[in-house]
Image (cartoon, rainbow, N blue to C red):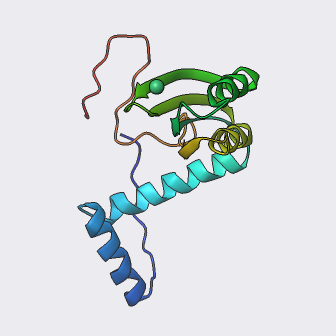
C-alpha cells in the first residue's frame, strides 16, 4: 500500500455541508475517498490539457440511413492520426446504430477527433469520455498487476 498521509483542511462550514450532501448522493462512504477521486479527476483533466498520450472512449448514436453518413464516418476514422484500439457497433433498431470507439493518442487530437465525429450530419448524440492510462495517478489501494500475465481483478 502506498503511504497514506493525513492532512487538515480549513473550509467554510457551508461549503463542507454542501460537499457532504453531494458525496452522499453519489454514495461515498467517507470524505477521504471523495476528495481522492476529485484529485484524480483533476490530474486526468490536466493530463488531457497538457496533451500527453492518453486514452478515452467516444460514444456516438446515429441514423445509418442518413445520406453519406457511413462514408463520412469511415473516411474520418481512416484519416485519424491517433489509434483506434477497438470499435463496438450495436444495431439499436431499424434506424439507429450505437458505436463506441476506444481511442488512444494525444489529448487534443482525441478531443478534435471526437468533435469531428459528433458534428457529422446524422450523428444524433456523441460524447467523449476522457480517462487515463493510469501512469500519472497513484494506484488505488495496493492492487497492481502486469497485463499479459495471469491475474484476477478482485480488489485487494
Ligand atoms: Ni448498425
Residue 155, image x, y percentages: 26, 34
Q: In this view, does 81 lie to the left or right of 124?
A: right
Q: In this view, does 87 lie above or below 45?
A: above
Q: In this view, does 122 lie above or below 8?
A: above
Q: Residue at x 42, y 55 (%)?
A: 37
Foreground pick, 72 / 43:
72
Q: In this view, does 140 lie above or below 87?
A: below
Q: Which residue is drawn at 34% across and 32% down?
A: 143
Foreground pick, 65 / 79:
65
Q: In this view, does 61 lie to the left or right of 110?
A: left
Which quadrant would residue 156 be assigned to in this image? top left
Q: Which residue is drawn at 62% across and 43% down?
A: 118
Q: Is residue 33 left or right of residue 130?
A: left
Foreground pick, 99 / 3:
99
Residue 64, image x, y percentages: 53, 30
Residue 24, image x, y percentages: 26, 68
Residue 113, image x, y percentages: 69, 37
Name the quadrant of the N terminus.
top left
Q: Is residue 69 above or below residue 127?
A: above
Foreground pick, 151 / 58:
58
Query: How many numbered tags mark residues here?
Result: 0
Q: Residue at x 25, y 60 (%)?
A: 27
Amino acid at each position: 500500500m502506498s503511504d497514506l498521509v493525513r492532512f487538515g483542511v480549513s473550509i467554510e462550514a457551508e461549503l463542507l455541508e454542501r460537499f457532504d450532501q453531494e458525496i452522499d448522493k453519489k454514495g461515498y462512504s467517507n470524505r477521504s475517498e471523495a476528495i481522492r477521486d476529485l484529485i484524480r479527476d483533476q490530474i486526468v483533466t490536466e493530463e488531457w490539457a497538457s496533451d500527453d498520450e492518453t486514452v478515452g472512449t467516444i460514444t456516438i448514436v446515429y441514423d445509418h440511413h442518413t445520406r453519406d453518413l457511413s462514408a463520412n464516418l469511415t473516411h474520418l476514422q481512416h484519416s485519424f492520426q491517433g489509434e483506434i484500439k477497438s470499435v463496438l457497433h450495436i444495431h439499436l433498431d431499424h434506424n439507429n446504430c450505437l458505436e463506441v470507439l476506444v481511442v488512444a493518442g494525444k489529448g487534443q487530437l482525441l478531443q478534435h477527433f471526437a468533435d469531428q465525429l459528433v458534428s457529422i450530419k446524422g450523428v444524433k448524440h456523441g460524447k467523449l469520455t476522457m480517462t487515463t492510462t493510469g501512469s500519472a495517478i497513484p494506484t488505488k489501494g495496493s492492487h497492481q498487476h502486469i497485463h499479459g500475465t495471469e491475474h484476477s481483478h478482485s480488489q485487494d
